[in-house]
Amino acid sequence: MGSIYQEAPPLPQDLKVRIQNSSMVFPSKQTERKSLFLSNIDRVLNFDVESVHFFASHKDFPPDIVVDRLKKALADALVAYDFFAGRLKLSPETGRLEIDCNGAGAGFVVASSELELDQIGDLVYPNPAFAQLVQKNKDFLEPGDQPLAVFQVTSFNCGGFAIGMSTSHTTVDGIGFTTFLENLAALAASKPLAATPCHDRRLLAARSPPCVTYSHPELLNLGHLAVPGAESGVFEASAEDLDFKIFRLTTHNINHLKSEAKASATGSAARITGFNIVTALVWRCKALSAGDDPNRSSTILYAVDIRSRLNPPLPRDYAGNAVLTAYATAKCEELERWPFGRLVEVVSEGAERMTDEYVRSAIDWGELYNGSPNGEVLVSSWWRLGFAGVEYPWGKPRYCCPVVYHRKDIILYFPPDDDEVVGGGGVNVLVALPPMEMQKFLKLFHEFLN
C-alpha cells in the first residue's frame, strides 16, 4: 500500500506570538458559591488539556470582533458552567480534591502573530510551536491563582486566528468539552444553550461502603506515594530522545484491515470497528518493537465512555468525566502469532468488560486506593470528538488539534483535516519512540498492513 507515514515537514519553530493583554472573565450573572464534588474519575485526571482551534479569516468577523464576542459568550457560559470559574482545593473535612465554585473567573489572553495562517505549516502535523498559541502561565494575573480554564485568541496577519484553550481535565472529558464548545458557540451567536449540562457528579460517587467486585489490573495502586496532580505511569514525560511520526490511515486502509480481521475472527463481526482494528495494529507494533522477550506481557489502555453503560444511564450531557480506562493484555508471542481477528477481539473485550457493575467496582477501587492507569501503552483518541464540527458565528474551525508533548507510552489518534467534519473514516496516528524502537515499529507496521 506504499508509504503511509509522514516525515516531519518544514515547521516554523517560532510563531512570533506577542501577548497584547491578559484579563479575567467572570460569570455574567452572580452564581451560587458552593463546593463541587469530584468523582474518583475526575480526581485521577488532575492535569491540563491544551488544544488549538484554527479559523480562516472571515470578512464579517475580524479577530477584534471575535475577541469581543468570545469574551461575552464565555462570561455567559460561566453561569451554566460555574465550575470553570472556580478553583481546585482540598476539602478540609474530607481531604478530597473538589472545586470551589467561587466565581474567581477564567483567564483570557489576546495575542497576535507576525505570520499568516498559511505560513505556520501543515496544521495536521503536530508542531511543538503550537504551544505558543495556548497560555501556559496560569497565574499571569495573580501569583498562586490557578484558573481551571484559560483561553487565548491569537490573530494572524491574514485575518485568520487561533483559539487556544487550556482546561483542567478534572472539569470535563472530551465529550463534555464538545458540548461546552457547542454551548459557547450558541451563546456567541446570541442563541440559547444548545444543551443543558448535568453537574451532578455524585452520580459517579463510590458506594458506601465501597465494594470492589473485580480485579482491576488496569489500575496501579500507588498507596501513600501518590501525590495529587502528579503525573505517573504512562502520563510521565520521557527523558529519552524520541523520534515521532504520523501514520496516516485512509478509509481504504481501515477497510482492508477490517476485511482481514473478519476473515480470521472467531466471534461477532460487530466488534470489528475502526477504533478496535487501528488499536490492535498499533498495539502489536508497539509491543513487538519494545524488545525481543516473547514471554513479556504487554497491556494497552484506552478510554471508554461509560454514560450509556450504567444502569440507569448517565444523562447524555453529563458534564464531568464519564470515561474509564479499558485494557487488553497478551504476551508478545501471542501478539505476533495470533491472527489479526483474534487480536481485534481481545482489544474489543476491554470495552465489553465495562458493565454497570464493573464501572461501580472501579470507582469503589478508587475510593480505597490512590492509583493511576497501569499499562505499557495508552491510546488517547481525539478521532471523533467532533470539535471541528462546532459551528461558531465565524464558521467552523479549519482544524482542531491537541498541543502535543511527546510521550513514549501514549499513542495519539486524531482526524485528518480533509474528512474530520464530513465523517470520513481516516485517522492519523502519532507515535513517539526512541529511534531504534521507531525503526522496528515502522517495519512491523508495514509488514502487518500489507
Image: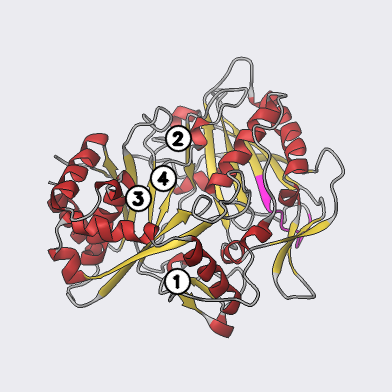
Based on the displayed image, in which of its 4 quarters is residue 352 positioned? bottom left
Q: Do the residues labelled 2 and 4 touch (CB within 8 Å)?
A: no
Q: Is residue 398 visible?
A: yes
SS of the residue at dot 2?
Answer: loop
Q: What residue type is labelled 1?
A: Gly
How far is the residue under mark 3 from the one under mark 4?
9 Å
Alpha carbon distance from label 2 to label 1: 33 Å
Q: Name the residue under label 1.
A: 233
Say if mark 3 contacts mark 4, CB within 8 Å: yes
Give the mark nearer the N terminus: 2 vs 1: 2
Say whether disc 3 or disc 2 marks the residue closer to the N-terminus: 2
For the point 58% across and 84% down, the residue is: 224
Q: Nearer the viewer, mark 3 or mark 4?
A: 3
Q: Can residue 8 be seen in this view?
A: no
User: Where is residue 127 shown, x and y percent of the image?
Assistant: 43, 45
**Which is more foreground, mark 3 or mark 2?**
3
Is 373 left or right of 186, judged from the image as shown? left
Question: Would you name the residue on which mark 3 appears?
Answer: 430
Q: Where is residue 84 in the image (x, y as percent from the top left)?
A: 71, 49
Magenta-span inclusion, residue 395? no
Which element type, helix, strand or loop, lies under badge 1? helix
